[in-house]
Each structure stands twice: as structure tokens, then as C-alpha cells.
Amino acid sequence: MPIAFESPDQPEVIALIDDLDAYQLTLYPPESVYALDLPSLMQPNVRFAVARDAAGAVVGCGAIVLTPEYGEIKRMYVQPAARGQGLARGVLALLEQAALDQGCPEMVLETGPSQPAALGLYERHGFQRCAPYGDYPDDPLSVFMRKPLRR
């Protein structure tokens, strides 16, 4: 299934992000969901990856916010029906390559304790738990992770 950088302002992508938001709000209260909105995803320092199925439908996504300090993973999601096919792994690999290309020394992310599959994915790909970074509060419903990048 193809995975490529695309614009997030496509109707199918917006619908997928809406699905992600609805899912997260079943797990966490709104004040513990640290999601980027569409205008933030459209910024020049953000790369947005889209996974499509064989028919071309959008089934997954992920973003990376590139800064001199790190690349932050945001908006990782694969529709439940498309899980188990390596799409999240593929999106993550593409985002990591973007961070490497930008010269980021590490990748970071914030996710939640109620998402064991996501935690497992990140751990299998070299992320380790860490303290809050950036402007994030020390939220008990957040799990912070980082991964050093090697060039």
C-alpha cells in the first residue's frame, strides 16, 4: 500500500483525522488530548504522511513537526480495518526519514497509556519513555517517548 507525503487538507484526510479525534476522546478527556489542528498541520515545518489502500482510499496518516531540537511525531492513526498490515510501521519509517533528512538529532512523541498497541509499536522501533518535553505538562494520561537518530 502506498505511503507518501501529501497535504492534510484533503476531504478524505480530514475525515480520517476526525475519526482519530473521536477515537482519542473515547480514551481521554479533551484536556489530555494534545492534537494538532489542520492549520498547524499545514505549516511549512510539518510533513504529513498518508497511507492509502489498493483502491486509493486514505486508511492511515502521521505527521512530523520538524525543529532544530527534534522531530515530533503527531497524528499517527490507522483505521481499525486496515491495521495489522504494517501501515503504521511504514508511516513511522517515512517520518523518521524526514527527520533524518532535516538533521534532527532525535524524534519525540506524546501518546497515552490507554493505547498499548501504539506504545508497543514505538518501543519496537527504538523509542524509550522519557520526561515531558517542550511545553507539555506532566500529565498522568500522557506517555512521553524519544528516540535518538543516527545519521
Image (spheres, helix red, strand yellow):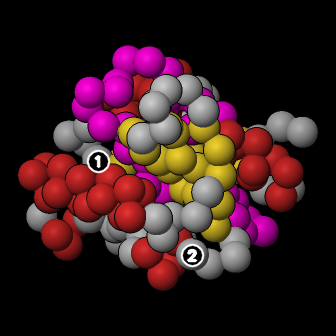
- Of pointers 1 and 2, the one earlier in the residue sequence: 2
Q: Is residue 139 left or right of residue 36?
A: left
* Distance from the alpha carbon under mark 1 to that under mark 2: 24 Å
Q: Which residue is mark 2?
A: 42
91 within the magenta span: yes
- Pinpoint residue 20: horizontal percent, then vertical percent: 28, 53
Q: Is residue 139 left or right of residue 89?
A: left
Q: Is residue 77 above or below residue 36?
A: above
- Pinpoint residue 116: horizontal percent, then vertical percent: 28, 30
Q: Is residue 133 above or below residue 128?
A: below
Identify the residue at image location x=47%, y=47%.
61
127 within the magenta span: no
Residue type of the residue flagged with mark 1: Gly
Q: Which mark is residue 112?
A: 1
- Pinpoint residue 2: horizontal percent, then vertical percent: 60, 33
Location of the C terminus by quadrant is: top right
- The quadrant in which residue 22 appears is bottom left
* Magenta highlight range: 65-93
Location of the N terminus by quadrant is: top right
Identify the residue at image location x=30%, y=37%.
79
Q: Residue furthest bottom?
A: 39
> Which residue is nearer to you in this view: 113 or 22?
22
Identify the residue at image location x=24%, y=53%.
19
